[in-house]
Image (cartoon, helix red, strand yellow):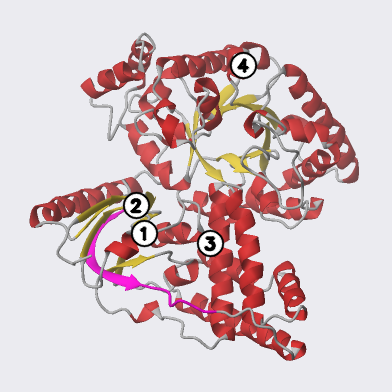
Amino acid sequence: MSKFRSYKFKGIGASSGISIAKVFKLTEQKIEISDAKITDIDAEIKIFQDGVQKSVEQIEKIKKLATKLNQDELEILDAHILIATDPVLEDDTINLIKSGYSAAYSLKETAKNHTNFLLETGDEYLMGRAVDIKDASQRIIKNILNLEIIDLSAIDEDVIIVADDLKPSDTAQLNEYVKGFATNIGSKTSHSAIMARSLEIPAILGIGDILEKAEAGDILAINGDLGQGILNPSESEIKEFEILKQEYENEKAKLQDYLNKESKSADGKKVVIAANIGSVDDSYAAKKVNADEIGLFRSEFLYMDNQNWPTEDEQFFSYKAVLETQNPKKVVVRTLDIGGDKTLKYFDFAKEMNPFLGYRAIRLSLDKTDIFKTQLRALVRASEFGNLAIMFPMVATLDEFFAAKAIFEQVYQEVIRENPKVAKREDIKIGIMIEIPISAIHADQFAKYVDFFSIGTNDLIQYSFAADRMNEKVAYLYQTLNPGLLKLIKMAIDAAHKHGKWIGMCGEMAGDINAVPLLLGLGLDEFSVSTSSVLKVKKLISDLNYEQMVKIANEALQFDTESEVVKYLESLNLIRHK
């Protein structure tokens, strides 16, 4: 495209911020790798191993040069070293070499198989991990073939990098001249996105065709919050972006004022602003923004990132690290939530007509009790090192809860006999997720027996509206402000409070700035959100009057449609970008 033609685009806002700068086009040279057979297998294996060693040394060098990253964030690069030296990747590659293929071809095919498996899961987190495998393997292949690897740290003018995909090892090299990046592919949970947020560089991923549209030297304006940008904007559009950029910088500075402030409304109603995490690294990010607690630790990623069922010790060390990092703050660990769109490479799920309604989450755990007990043992052992709460996912009936809790009680007694230092039984709270409509309707009965609830709105919404949230054709049914959904949420909140229990929300709705005022008014105790949203939600709630929100929420429940609720909230200036 000509540098003078304007092009507006939208992608995934992966890192907040607004920037205007020249395009630095990062294009990967096409690598042609032949499948021709080789004869000297031992020599080819050595070429592969030397390529791995050189790549590890390069990543170590990048770590030393990445002065803007703290130690926690540098651990992301360690993950690339682990991929490069992964025994499974190495064994699969060497086996192909032994079949008579070159080192480069063997690694390319092995990496493709591994990444395809992760991409086929459809899970955003695992799709991000696929990018990491691609990054690490591409570096090794380039070293095998003695190809040049671009040094982004040499950039010496203000630019926004445009690429098909910007890899974590690339983002680690970005200096003060890089003002943002825009890529064709990527996800919010990829390591590149995590690093961009750490570096506070605005980023838009998953645009689709920005690399093809942009040319080096074009002007690019991006809004990482909205995931929107303009290639070659007009003078008036540039001025609009500059105004937005100044407003963003002012707002960002103000958010830091809330880092150590108590989470409460303008009229003193206290709430908990917690963080959702999926790893030990995420726990450090939660600590950085001073989240009140961890409202959701997605333990399934310990299974999905593994080559086999994680052992008790492997799980124990992960839980222990998070609990120690957060101590004395509470950490709510969700037990294995696998199935549906989340699969395992080492476990064959039976073919189901509708896996989202089938064999998954607590249903699998109650069937595979050996796997469930292993996880519970690791959790109980880790309770010695912090404030642990355990949450069962996808619970539909009281019988399921009773069965899961009985297994926990059995495991607890076994572990405490082995180690009396673990937490007292009454200090480990046991709760469930409210993500099935029947659980919300039956919440008054559940609340007699559980210690807490956490509403999983991602599934609750799609089950309530019978609409796949990943299907664009029915995306209009993902209605967070629909009065019917709000009544379900209110039902669960009232039931919890009637029995003296606390209730949180760990779905995306908890961080939706348009939903937060109503959720506060409905009486939600805990808002568990992404780490990047913790301070935003804290500030928003501090500006709201709880008593007023109660009246507004009750009024919203009386409307018939979501559009009526939106119109009502707009009249009160409580809607943004809806």
Q: Which residue is mark 2?
A: 16
Residue 488 lies left or right of residue 166; in this view the side is right
Closer to the observer: label 1 or label 3?
A: 3
Q: Residue at position x 64%, y 49% from top?
A: 301
Q: Residue at position x 54%, y 42% from top?
A: 276
Image: magenta residue range: 15-32
Residues under numbered marks 2 and 3 in contact, where contact means CB atoms less than 8 Å apart: no
Q: Which residue is mark 1?
A: 200
Residue 409 lies left or right of residue 352; in this view the side is right
How packed is label 2: few (under 14 Cα within 10 Å), some, or many (20 or more)?
many
* Badge 1 amino acid: Glu
Q: Which residue is mark 3?
A: 131
Q: Earlier in the sequence, mark 2 or mark 3?
A: 2
Q: Earlier in the sequence, mark 4 or mark 2?
A: 2
How packed is label 3: few (under 14 Cα within 10 Å), some, or many (20 or more)?
many
Q: Position of residue 557 (x, y in %)?
A: 39, 12
Residue 310 lies left or right of residue 259; in this view the side is right
Can residue 414 be seen?
yes
Find numbered disc 2 in the image and state the secondary structure of the residue it sits on: loop
Please determine whether, in this image, residue 388 is positioned above or below residue 53.
above
Work out whether residue 145 or residue 265 is closer to the camera in this orientation and state it: 145
